[in-house]
């Protein structure tokens, strides 16, 4: 924009138009500043240089008289500049809001829930089956161990029973052997006594048959005879008296080889032909 110089022949209307143009430019600049400030929350500093036309000089000195120039033809007034319209920013489109995901359809949600429940049920059944199987194996193991323990205990009892039976049999055999030995020793002891008494018997003449006489003899541990009693007569008094005299004559009687074989009371049988 060209600023008229002072002292030119512009009219007051021209000056008013110039001032209005300057004001419109200032308003436009301010609008731009305000618009930028409104759009940017963190505005940067802006430096604006404003230039105003020189103020008109009041009461100018009248020009010196000079020959009047020929009148110039009137210049056409420049068209008044319309103030620029403020730039209207197009409204900003609101941010696009994503619609929330639509919830699953009831049937799909129900199917998924049922499938989950079915999986959980199968998992529980699997765990329970594994637990029952483990308990079954443990019970079978315990039963097997119990059977083995019972078998071992039965074997031990049978072995103990066999040992006890063998021990009883051995003891019985020992007792039988001892009894047999005792019986043999006792019989030998009695035979020695009878043999000594027979050596002292004087048989009567014309003794019929082979009669038997039985006597009870009481003796001391030393073999001394203290009593003789006829228990069973042979039927021949002479033979009975002959045997009794022989018993008394045989005192002291032979003693046994072992002290436990000694018997205080003896039952002795005699026959003339033995």
Image: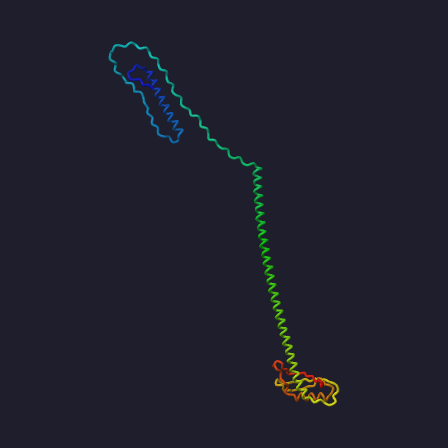
Image quadrant where residue 235 sits: bottom right
Name the quadrant of the N terminus. Answer: top left
Report whether 170 appears left or right of 6. right
Q: What percent of the width, then of the height, locates residue 171? A: 62, 73
For the residue pair 230 and 57, the one nearer the viewer reads as: 230
Q: What percent of the width, then of the height, locates residue 200? A: 67, 88
Image quadrant where residue 207 sits: bottom right
Report whether 48 appears left or right of 160. left
Please, is residue 159 above or below residue 126 in the view? below
Please, is residue 106 above or below residue 263 in the view? above
The number of numbered discs placed on residues in the rendered structure image is: 0
Please, is residue 64 above or below residue 125 in the view? above
Name the quadrant of the C terminus. Answer: bottom right
Name the colouring of the figure. rainbow
Q: What percent of the width, then of the height, locates residue 48? A: 34, 26
Q: What percent of the width, then of the height, locates residue 201? A: 69, 88
For the residue pair 264 and 202, the one nearer the viewer reads as: 202
For the residue pair 241 and 100, the one nearer the viewer reads as: 241
């Amino acid at each position: 924009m060209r600023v008229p110089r002072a002292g030119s022949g512009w009219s007051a209307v021209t000056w008013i138009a110039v001032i209005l143009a300057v004001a419109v430019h200032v308003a436009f600049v301010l609008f731009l500043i305000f618009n930028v400030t409104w759009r940017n929350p963190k505005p940067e500093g802006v430096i604006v240089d404003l230039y105003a036309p020189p103020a008109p000089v009041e009461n100018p000195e009248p020009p010196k008289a000079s020959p009047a120039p020929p009148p110039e033809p009137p210049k056409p007034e420049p068209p008044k500049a319309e103030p620029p319209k403020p730039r209207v920013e197009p409204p900003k489109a609101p941010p696009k809001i994503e619609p929330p995901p639509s919830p699953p359809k009831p049937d799909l949600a129900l199917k998924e829930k049922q499938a989950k429940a079915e999986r959980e049920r199968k998992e529980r059944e699997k765990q329970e089956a594994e637990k029952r199987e483990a308990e079954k194996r443990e019970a079978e193991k315990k039963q097997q161990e119990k059977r083995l323990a019972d078998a071992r205990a039965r074997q031990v009892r049978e072995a103990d029973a066999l040992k006890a039976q063998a021990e009883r049999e051995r003891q019985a055999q020992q007792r039988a052997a001892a009894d047999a030995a005792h019986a043999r020793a006792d019989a030998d002891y009695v035979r020695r006594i009878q043999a000594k008494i027979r050596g002292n018997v004087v048989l009567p003449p014309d003794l019929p048959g082979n009669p038997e006489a039985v006597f009870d003899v009481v003796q001391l541990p030393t073999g001394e005879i203290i009593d003789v009693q006829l228990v069973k007569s042979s039927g021949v008094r002479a033979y009975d008296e002959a045997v009794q005299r022989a018993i008394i004559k045989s005192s002291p009687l032979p003693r046994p080889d072992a002290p436990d074989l000694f018997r205080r009371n003896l039952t002795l049988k005699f026959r003339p032909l033995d």
